[in-house]
Image (cartoon, rainbow, N blue to C red):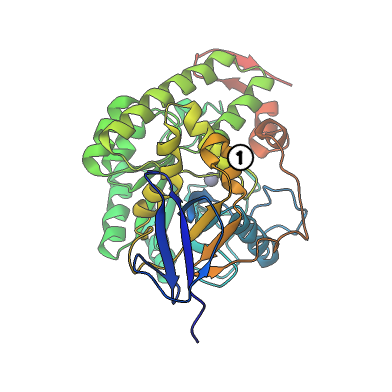
Amino acid sequence: MSTPAYHLNATLLPEAKENVDIWVSEGRFTFSQVSGAIDLPGAFMAAGMVDGHVHLSLDFANTGLPPATSELVLHNAKRHLRSGVTVVRDAGFVQQLNLTDVHLPDLPEILLSGWIHVPEGRFFPGIDISKATSPEQLLARFKEVAAHGCKWFKIIADFPGTDMNLFAAPITYPVEIIREVVKAAHAVGVRVLAHSTGGDVGAIIETGVDSIEHGMSITPNHVRRMAELGTQWCPTIATAEGFLLAAEEKGMPSEIRATYSARTTESLKLAMELGVDVLAGSDELAHGTIDLEIDAMVRHGMTVQQAIASATTIGRRALALPGVEEGAPADLIVWDEDPRDDLSRLTRPSIVLGRGVPLNLSIVDVVPGTVLSARERHGDQSLNRMLADETCVFADGKGHKHG
Ligand SMILES: [Zn+2]
């Protein structure tokens, strides 16, 4: 069945040279005129956004839908789609739902990494998206996830000890084991995501993992090595800031967040210079609010163009997806007003085309949920509960007794 053809004439972000004419025919982009195409309105457009780090099975938009159900997953996915995100990479999914990448109309493309692997007791308690995996089990677990067809594999490569110091999180798996898993993954076309917040991130980068998730301790020296090795970085800055703000409320000195911000700014600037692929990931922000992460990137030294690229051109390249190019599946978002003047417009597109089909943007109006600030949201999170119970030692090496 043939679908209608469409035509747009608008400024293509992020580069934004002069206006471009684009046609969509049979669900694909073409730069050659298609007769009879329907003119779509809009002044600005971009390739459908990519959110590089989400958790669809967790209720970060506070919808109240039952956790770990396909109902919640689909709802969250639609929330992303409505915000102009046409591809999400899930960086840790609930174990009991069937695992297979999802390519359905009226949903973004969902790329799954399966559940998170972490040694017993080295992750947030009570979160159903991780699977306790000893170092000896890691390779076998990789094979299990790969057999489900996942093209990504997620490990927690470091995690705080009882002091809950994110910046001094010890490595969870021996680096030789991580290296072995990376080798096995690459041999079958799977890529490895490594969660890291601690100062030993350099050793994790050296294992050859494909992406550092969070990377709260990444310095310019690490960035140089990432550029050499082709390591991607999904800094999830807004989520990290949320954790640090919550910790401040428990007594952590604010200089720690300032130090993190300064280091991240310096590192991101160098990453841009050296061509490291930096992806926008909303992580624990409410589903469908990637604009908040893009805004955080701009506050940390990236230009507006670079930050938008991280969710469009760069993000797509990093996930091996085509952008706005001849013959590519037409994933496109359109705005009436320039989102560069107000980044919150990014997630309020006027039109979303998913693989060439205009999508109904009202599909998730039934469960509005709430968008809480990071500080509000983290008020009830497990890390915070742990912080309340612990004497916390942060990056300044001083203990802070709470509660
Ligand atoms: Zn995450």
Q: Nearer the viewer, residue 197 or 299?
A: 299
Disc 1 target residue: 344
Q: What is the x, y in percent for residue 121?
A: 55, 43
Q: What is the x, y in percent for residue 342?
A: 58, 36
Q: Quadrant of residue 289?
A: top right
Residue 241 appears left or right of 191: right
Query: Which residue: 48% across, 56% down?
Result: 48
Answer yes or no: disc 1 within 8 Å of ligand 1: no
Q: Residue furthest front?
A: 35
Count of numbered circles in the view: 1
Q: Is residue 122 visible?
A: no
Q: Nearer the viewer, residue 202 or 105?
A: 105
- Using the image, determine if residue 251 lies above or below residue 156: above
Q: Nearer the viewer, residue 309 or 227?
A: 309
- Which kind of residue does numbered mark 1 sit on? Ser
- Using the image, determine if residue 95 lies above or below residue 371: below
Quick one: SS at disc 1?
helix
Q: What is the x, y in percent for residue 296?
A: 53, 32
- Using the image, determine if residue 355 lies above or below residue 121: below
Query: Which residue: 68% across, 30% down?
Result: 375
Tell me if mark 1 has few (under 14), some (14-19) or many (20+) residues whose alpha carbon lies within 10 angstroms of its own. Answer: some
- Using the image, determine if residue 106 lies above or below residue 244: below
Q: Residue furthest left?
A: 228
Query: Which residue: 74% across, 21% down?
Result: 403
